[in-house]
Amino acid sequence: KPFSVLVTGGAGYIGSHAVLALLDAGWKVVVLDNLATGFRWAVPETVEFVLGDVADMEMVQATIAKHNIGAILHFAGSLLVGESVGNPLKYYRNNTAASRTLIEAAIGAGVHHFVFSSTAATYGMPEVVPVAEDAPKAPINPYGLSKLMTEQILADVAAAHPLNYAALRYFNVAGADPQGRSGQSVAGATHLIHIACEAATGKRGHVGIYGDDYPTPDGTGVRDYIHVSDLADAHVAALEWLIANPSESLTANVGYGRGYSVLEVLDVVDHVTNMAIERRQEPRRAGDPPTLVADNRRILETLSWRPRHGDLASIVASALAWERTLQERGLSS
Ligand code: UFG
C-alpha cells in the first residue's frame, strides 16, 4: 500500500470495526482517539495508537508526517441524538468544529483522501422512503445538523484543495465483529438491538416499545439495520474508490434498503435467544420518524461493496455474543 491510514475514533464502536476491516485488507493503520467514549482494548496491540484529540492540529500534523498518512477515516465524534438536544454546543464542538480543524490539518499536511462518518439523521423526517441522497436535508436535532455542516465543509474544501472525500450516511448500525474481536460498548447507548441484548442477558428487565401507532404495517418504527462489519467494509471500499478517482467525491447512504419494525426486531431477538423478553408499550420518543430506510442504489452502483452480513438474525446473534463477552470480562458499561 502507498501510505498509512489514520483512523480517528478507532477505539470506538464503528471505528474499531473499520480498523479490523482495514487490517484485513492489508492497510497499515494508525489510530487517534482521546478515549472519551472509546476503549484502548478495542484497538489491536499491533496497531499504532495515539492518545489525543482530533482538534489538536499540531499533534495531528506531526502524526501525519511521522506515519506517512495519506488518508483519514474520521469516526471521532458524539452520537447521541437526545444528548445533542440538551447539549448542542458539545455536538457543534466535537462533530463540526473539531472536524473543521482536522480537515485543515489534513490539507496542511498533504493528505488527499478523507472518509467521513455521516448519518441518516441529516434527512430529518424524510417525506419519501426509501430516502435517496439528494432528498431534502432537514435535520431535526443538533446531532444531524452538526454532521451535515461537516459534509458542507468537506464539499467546499474539496472544491478548493487537492482532497477528495466520501461522506457515508449511516442508517441503523448494529451487531459486532463475527470473529468476536470488537462490538458495541457505548455508555448510555439507546439503540434498540443493544437494549434488547441487554435485556436478553439480564442487564435490564424489559424493552420499551416507543409508540405503536405509527403509519407502519404493525404500528412500530421501521429502520434499516446494517451490520457494523458491512459498514466497516464500505469504508475500505470508499477509500479504494477515492484513490482510484482522485478528482471525484462521493456522498452515499450506507444501508441495505430494507426495513424491520421494532416488533420484528424483538421477535428475532426472542427467536435467537429462545426467550420471551418482556415488552412494555411506551409513548413515542420525541423526534423519531416512523420509517427510515436507505435508497442504497448509489453506493451499490459506485463502490464494489456488497452486504455480506445482512441477515437480521446474524446481526442480533453477533450483538448478543458481544454483550456476553463484555459481561464475562467485566467490561460492560
Ligand atoms: N426503540 C424502541 N425502544 C428502545 C429503543 C428504540 O422502541 O428501547 C425504537 C425507536 O423508537 C425506533 C427504533 O427502535 O423506532 C430504532 O431506534 P434506535 O434508538 O435504535 O435508533 P434511531 O433510529 O433512533 O437512531 C439511529 C442512530 C442515530 C441516527 C439515527 C438516524 O442511533 O445516531 O439512527 O440515522 F441519527
Image (cartoon, rainbow, N blue to C red):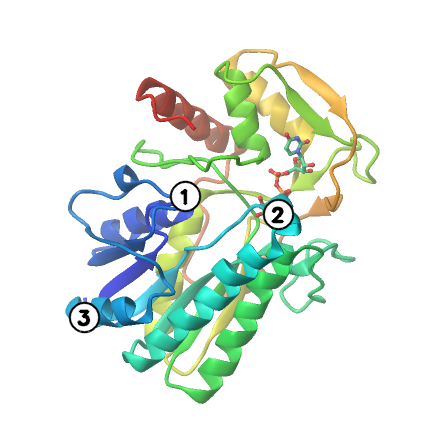
- Kindly indicate the quadrant of the structure image that contains residue 13: top left
Horizontal relation, residue 317 to residue 119: left or right = left
Look at 32% across and 40% down and name the residue there: 39
Q: Residues within 10 Å of mark 3 (few under 14, many from 20)?
A: some
70 with respect to 250 (left or right):
left
Compare residues 75 and 276 and report the one nearer the observer. Answer: 75
Q: Residue furthest top?
A: 275
Measure the alpha-carbon separation of dots 1 and 3: 27 Å
**CB at mark 1 closer than 8 A to ligand 1?**
no
- Vertical placement of residue 132 versus 333, above or below: below
User: Which numbered disc flags the more N-terminal residue, 2 or 1?
Assistant: 1
Question: Whole-percent x and y of residue 267?
Answer: 63, 22
Residue 68 disc label: 3
Q: Amino acid at mark 2?
A: Val
Q: Quadrant of the N terminus?
A: bottom left
Of the numbered discs in the image, which one, if any, rests on residue 215?
none
Residue at the disc numbered 1: 37
Q: Is residue 224 above or below residue 89?
A: above
**Viewer can see residue 185:** yes
Q: Report the mark closest to the observer, 3 or 2.
A: 2
Rate crowding at label 2 as few (under 14), some (14 to 19) or many (20 or more) other CA atoms within 10 Å. Answer: some
> Which residue sits furthest bottom?
160
Disc 1 residue type? Answer: Thr
Indicate left or right for 265 with 124 as reference.
Answer: left
